[in-house]
Amino acid sequence: MKKINLDHNKKLLIPELIKIVGIDNVIQDENELDFFSSDIFYESSIKASLVISPKSSEQTASSINLITSYGIPVIPRGGGMSYTGGYTPMIDGSVIIDLRKLNNIININKEDMYVTVECGVTWKTLYEELKKHGLRTPYFGPFSGIHATVGGALSQNSVFYGSSLYGTAAESVLSLDVALQDGTILKTGSNSNKINPSPFFRTYGPDLTGLFLGDTGALGFKVKATLKLIPFPKEQRFSSFDFSSDLEMFETMGEITRKQLAQECYGFDPFLMGLRMQFEGLKKDLKSLSALTKSQKNIFSGVKEVIKVASAGRSFMEGVGYAMHITVEGKNDKEVSSSIEQIKSIAEKNNGKEIANSLPKLVRANPFLPTNRLLGPKGERWVPIHVILPHSKVKGILKEIDSYFNANKDIIEKNKIKWGYLTSTIGTSAILLEPTFFWEDSHYQIHKRYIEKSHYNKLNTFPENLAARNAMKKIREDMSSIFMNNGGTHLQVGKMYKYKENRQETAWNLLVSIKKILDPNNLINPGSLGLK
């Protein structure tokens, strides 16, 4: 292997890369390197030396092999929605591969009910194309699906749309094509058959597909994925409830998800629910809701839904404590009505009060809004941290989190940090708890590029606030320790969560062995998953 420092040998590498991806797809501009090297929270002190944008699986595989042959680390990047250092460089001279030009929907197979895509396609693009065919993937994206790519979500794993019934993004996957360090492309599942392959079945022998899901790009670059399909639901219903205590809300959410009654079941504490109402105005809400009325079977029913939201205005959440929101889908009115009635009964049993269901309607009316919530409603910096737990452990961890913030009240107040939390169920067995923080600080390029210009221009800007940013780093580090000690797990592990620290020795050694086989010199996203 050639051991060459990229900064001093660009003349050797760049012409070879240009032959593979074309001159327009080799990026050296300093501002662009800044943008690609930082995520929503981490502004890396180490910048990538180059960014390249291949247009095919073959170009990606050849580029990886070429770059690593020089002993240079290479990092995959999708839509850039990480806040855990998932793609931030840790080694000088690293090259980032921007995978967003691998954005084709290759095959919508209606007979075998799967869709194959290149991994740079966004969830919004996939959702809209499948809807034309009356189809959908079971899990169909995160809030940030306007930018978030399929490959990014599979590398980080993600939840939201459909997750209460269908689980995480990983659980909708049938097959992968993965570009490895040596330039080969690995196919998984039934698609790895030598004779007459087809990506219709995942677990043919040991589940090699699962090995690359949630790996945060540490084992290889996902270039194609095949996902399950389901019929697009004919009916949707929505419910919202107010609870005076978080424990009542969590008890309700647990019972709803155990009975598999909802596609989405999520909640907000009073602070975050109040903040959520500050973002958009009613006019924009109604424009979004018109998309839902057009998709409804009975247009008059749809118009009535718009009128209800208009009547409620932006005050429909005033005085609400802990707010739980529900989306139910089904084949017919009888099915969804039955689920809604059961949900109401469960909520009432736990002292839940039914309130206007405008929020879940608005969320589903336009699932993939512009990512204007990358900053707070007044321009404050925003970052979350999360943990996934079994329902039985939620009560205990809520007490620990409250105790932590009471003990650290001074650092919170001194740095004007505000926080609340959201929560969402995942399948029948798990729940996500996501503390979310806001503070006054300068903005990164990702904020300026990914937030609508008309919205961004209305926001306050703040000077750099390293004291508050460092306080946030400490808080998130402390939170990750609390989560680890409670047996929690995480999506988007990146380079932040205590993954290595909480692995049993046999499991960790097996992962290290796999890494050595696939990437013997640790040049594929070094540092991710704690693999250094």
Image (cartoon, rainbow, N blue to C red):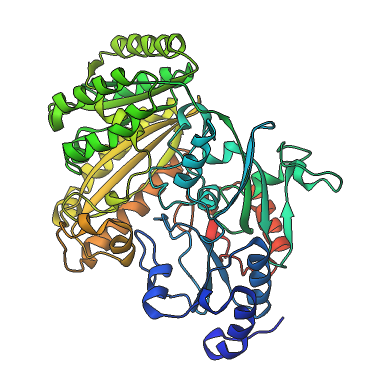
Where does residue 402 sit, x and y in percent of width and height? 26, 37
Number of on-image labels: 0
Q: Is 237 or 85 nearer to us in this picture?
A: 237
Where does residue 365 sit, x and y in percent of width and height? 33, 33
Residue drawn at x 71%, y 57% is: 513
Residue drawn at x 66%, y 53% is: 511
Relative to 127, 15 lies left or right: right
Q: Quarter holding the N terminus?
A: bottom right
Task: Say which quarter of the image contains residue 301.
Answer: top left
Residue drawn at x 60%, y 77% is: 72
Relative to 107, 498 lies left or right: left
Relative to 368, 285 lies left or right: left
Task: Say which quarter of the image contains residue 237.
Answer: top left
Q: Is 229 or 206 nearer to us in this picture?
A: 229
Q: Is 427 or 338 nearer to us in this picture?
A: 338
Q: Quarter holding the C terminus?
A: bottom right
- Can see residue 521? no
Where does residue 508 sit, x and y in percent of width and height? 63, 52
Most extreme residue toward the right is 195
